[in-house]
Image (cartoon, rainbow, N blue to C red):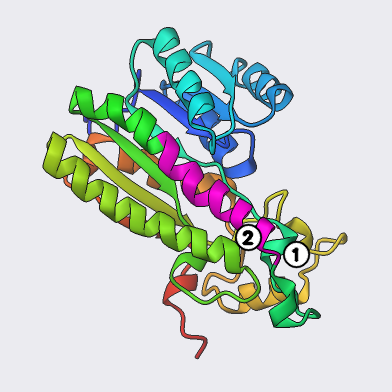
Amino acid sequence: MNQLFNIENKVIAVTGATGILAGGLARYLLEQGAKVAILSLFPEEVEEAVKEAKTISEHVTGFACDVTNSEQVQAAHDHVIATFGTIDVLINGAGGNMAGAIAGPDQDLFDALKLDDYAKVMDLNLKGTVIPSLIFGKTIAEKGQGSILNFSSMSSEQSITRVLGYSNAKAGVDNFTRWMATEMAQRYGSGVRVNAVAPGFFVTHQNRALLTNEDGSFTERGQKVINNTPMLRFGEADEVFGAFHYLMSDASSFVTGTVIKVDGGFSCYSGV
């Protein structure tokens, strides 16, 4: 049997694992035989996610933590090690946006940005990737084997209107992915890898009202996205899982510092 894509018994910690993409990914990994730690901010959401996940596998645990708080992330790390004895993969799925970090179409550009909200969005998406990577990454580096996988975005390389804070943060995530990949490989060997996946447009709790109307039709912004996506549709959550699976498996053993796009062609289309 080909073992290249086998992730059975790998211990995988997923931050933001109560959301649609990261949460769905956590459940998918359990279906593949992995042992999964569901990490997210709110205890009640973690408890519910773990309860649901246990219908798939008993090899799951949960821990509530703020990914921008080093002490809380360290506590989450220690819980994972105490529960499973090791860590093989960290997936940084925590992220989000705030109204004050967006320049709305009806706002004056120079008055729209609220710097406190902008800082919070930068912290959540960038600092909330760096801190877990340093804490879980230390254990992975000591093993000399394992992966860190980050969630990037279409907005990291392209100018997508309105979402300044989120775009800035995800551009930082791409840069951090390349930097961390280089440092980890040079210092701790080729068994330690860092990569990212950049989903295209998927309908989630956070962007549903931005992309679709209550009747399921597209908003003006949603239609613009569709018009610039050669596949002419939004992605389904499970369509991002394969890229993560590949990047944590032996099939990608010579892959580090890369960002894989799962976007229906959005990033390659010029609009003509």
Badge 1 amino acid: Leu
Q: Nearer the viewer, residue 96 or 4?
A: 96
Q: State the image quarter where residue 33 is shown.
A: top left
Number of numbered discs present? 2
Boundaries of the magenta span: 114-132
Instruction: Please rate how many residues cluster around mark 2, counting C-alpha atoms within 10 Å: few if below 14, some from 14 to 19, many from 20.
Output: many
Badge 2 amino acid: Tyr
Q: Pinpoint residue 58: horizontal percent, then vertical percent.
A: 53, 10
The quadrant of the picture occupied by the N terminus is top left
Q: Nearer the viewer, residue 45 or 216?
A: 45
Q: Nearer the viewer, residue 208 or 122?
A: 122
Instruction: Please rate how many residues cluster around mark 1, counting C-alpha atoms within 10 Å: few if below 14, some from 14 to 19, many from 20.
Output: some
Q: Is residue 99 left or right of residue 196?
A: right
User: Which residue is identified by label 1?
Assistant: 210
* Residue 272 forms part of the magenta stretch: no
Can residue 154 be seen here? no
Q: Is residue 194 left or right of residue 159?
A: left
User: Which residue is identified by label 2?
Assistant: 118
Q: State the image quarter where residue 147 is shown.
A: top left
Q: CA distance from mark 1 to mark 2?
A: 19 Å
Q: Secondary structure at mark 1?
A: helix
Mark whose residue sits in front, 1 or 2: 2
Main secondary structure of the magenta stretch: helix
